[in-house]
Structure formats: C-alpha cells, structure tokens
Amino acid sequence: MPDTTPPRPQPPRPQPPRPVVRPRRLRRTPSLRRMVAETRVPPASLVLPMFVKEGITEPVPVPSMPGVLQHTRDSLRKAAREAVEAGVGGLMLFAVPERKDPLGLAATDPEGILNVAVADLAAEVGDATTVMADLCLDEFTDHGHCGVLAADGTVDNDATLDRYGRMAVALADAGTDVVGPSGMMDGQVAAIRGALDAAGHTGVAVLAYAAKYASAFYGPFRDAVDSSLTGDRRTYQMDPANGGEAMREVRLDVAEGADIVMVKPAMSYLDIVRRTAEAVDVPVAAYQVSGEYSMVEAAAARGWIERDRAVAETLTSIRRAGASIILTYWAVDAARGLL
C-alpha cells in the first residue's frame, strides 16, 4: 500500500546576502563610465611620427603601414597642419635622403632633407606644436647602422658621438624644439647636450631613447625609411630579456641631461614604462612602434578585431603604465575623438 503521509515541510533555505557594494553601478551607462575613468589620453600627450622623402613629387604609401605616407615637403606641411588642427601635441620627423654614404653626411648638411623639412615645419606650425626630429644616422648611412663603422665593421661608439653632436646642432639651427637621439650609443645624451650648449642652443630639449630594445616590431618602419640595414643592431640596442639594464640606461640618460626619457617599443614593455615612471622625475615617453600599429591594422582589415576599440585600448594601456607622452601613428585619429 502506498505511503500517503504528506511530506514534512522543509525549512526555507537561507538566501545569500544581497551585495551592498556594487562596483557595476559605475559601469551602467557610457556617461558614468566616462565620468569615473581613471586614465585619459589627452591629445596634447600624443606625438605623430612623420616621414619625408627626398626626390619624390607625390606622397608614397608605406606598404606595410596602411594609412602612413612618405611625404613630399609640400604634403608634409599639409599633413602637419591637419595634425595640429586635430590637437596633436607634437610631430616627430624622420627623413629619407636620395643619397647615402658611410658617414651619413646628409644628416649634418644644412640643405639635407631632414634639416630643410624641420625648417619647413618650424615655419608652418612651430608656433602651435612641438617640432621634434629623430637624431640618428641609420636613415642616412649606406650600411643602415645607427653610427659610424670601425674598420672591423662594428659600430664605433665614440666616433658616432661626434657625428651626433654635429647632427644635433644642424637640427637646432633648422628650428627643432626637441632632438630625439635613438641610436643607443653610450654617452650620446651628454655628447648631444654638450654640443647644443656650446653652439648656444641651450633651449633645445633632448628626448632620449633611453631604453630602446632590439625588437622584432620595427620591421614596417624599415620600409618607411627605406632602410639599408643588413644584419641587426643587437650590439647596441637592448636585449628584450633585460629590465634592470633598462633602469641603468634610463638613470644614465637623466644624469647626462635628458629632459625626457623614452621606452621603445611600448606595448611589449609596459612593465619597463611603469618602472621608468617610478624611477625618474622627468617626463616619460613611450613609442608605439610600426609593428604594433601594423598588427592592429592588419587584423582589423580582416575583421578579426574592432579597430577603434583596439586602438583606444592600446593607447590607454600605455598611458596607464605611466607614459605621459605617446608617440603613435594613430595620433591624429585619437586626437579627433577616437578615445
């Protein structure tokens, strides 16, 4: 006979306590998220790298960097005006000469393409933005290295310092506000600062590429500057495995008179950006390099990621790590409201 005894009532199960603290409240709407955002990337913190090429009559697209051009002097001035109107804080100029030689003589020629283009920018937008120039020999040497070669084919550090000093003075004479020594030669900041001061250019600032790594992410940039390099730069650029060494390099550059120090590349070295920001009391820059740019653009072109969101996220991460200045090929897009 079946059991017809009614089931005994079960006591109600205790309910988990309702959360009182709800961080999601401040994520509920776009306006709330904007209001409480901890990290912002103002346009004035962005620097646009630009390329000018001697001997061309029309801008030339860089195949591996969608949207980036090798400019004529005329198109460079136009693009610079557009960047300034967007609110970009600075322009970093690189040049591609028609002729190269072992010493990179075009770099110190007052009529060389980099120096005349700096003068163009200083006249065109110099009152409205910061004109910066790359200070390195790699674009100008037929061997593609960042310095003068010794008889055995290695880069002669101290002979290169003399060339850097001369280049710094030529750029300052042309009207640059900031020189960016990127060659990673020992003592380069002191040599450049001494040359500038001796020539009366005490107001020209030095943005030191203090921790520049021998990175695989520079490949597209070499297209942009028509690089002549064979081999690699591992004897003077830093080993990606080393962080403590980067701090030594940063401190040396500050001691030698650097006004700003930079980490390059940015995204694979955010830990170095953070450590640098904590170690020094000068502004810290980071360079979001060509390979970082091209990877995002290539993935976005294939529909694999959302381009604008990815760009904004990368720039925000660099700023959050501690960079107060970001060199990026997306500077104009970001300044126009992408962020």
Image (cartoon, rainbow, N blue to C red):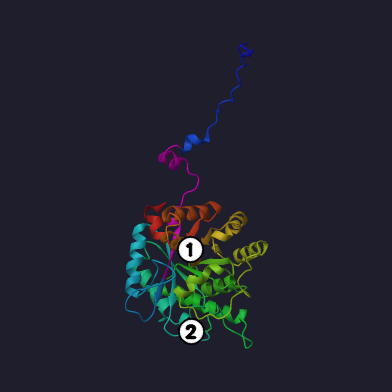
Seen at 58% across and 60% down, the residue is 269
Seen at 52% across and 53% down, the residue is 317
| Contact between labelled residues 1 and 2, with CB atoms less than 8 Å apart | no
Mark 2 neighbour class, 10 Å CA radius: few under 14, some 14 to 19, many 20 or more: some
Give the farthest residue toward the front: 1
The kind of residue on which mark 2 rests is: Leu
Seen at 41% across and 72% down, the residue is 63
Does the magenta portion include 32? yes
Q: Is residue 310 visible?
A: yes
The kind of residue on which mark 1 rests is: Met
- Residue 253: x and y in percent read 60, 66
| Region in magenta | 28-50
- Residue 58: x and y in percent read 32, 76
Q: Is residue 200 visible?
A: no
Q: Which residue is mark 2?
A: 105
Q: Is residue 279 above or below residue 29?
A: below
Give the farthest residue toward the right: 244
Q: Which residue is mark 1?
A: 295
Q: Mark 2 or mark 1, which is nearer to you?
A: 1
Give the farthest residue toward the top: 5
Q: Secondary structure at mark 2?
A: helix
Q: Is residue 7 left or right of residue 27?
A: right
Q: Is residue 117 above or below residue 21?
A: below
Seen at 33% across and 71% down, the residue is 75
Mark 1 neighbour class, 10 Å CA radius: few under 14, some 14 to 19, many 20 or more: some
Q: Is residue 276 above or below residue 157?
A: above
The number of numbered discs placed on residues in the rendered structure image is: 2
- Residue 296: x and y in percent read 46, 60
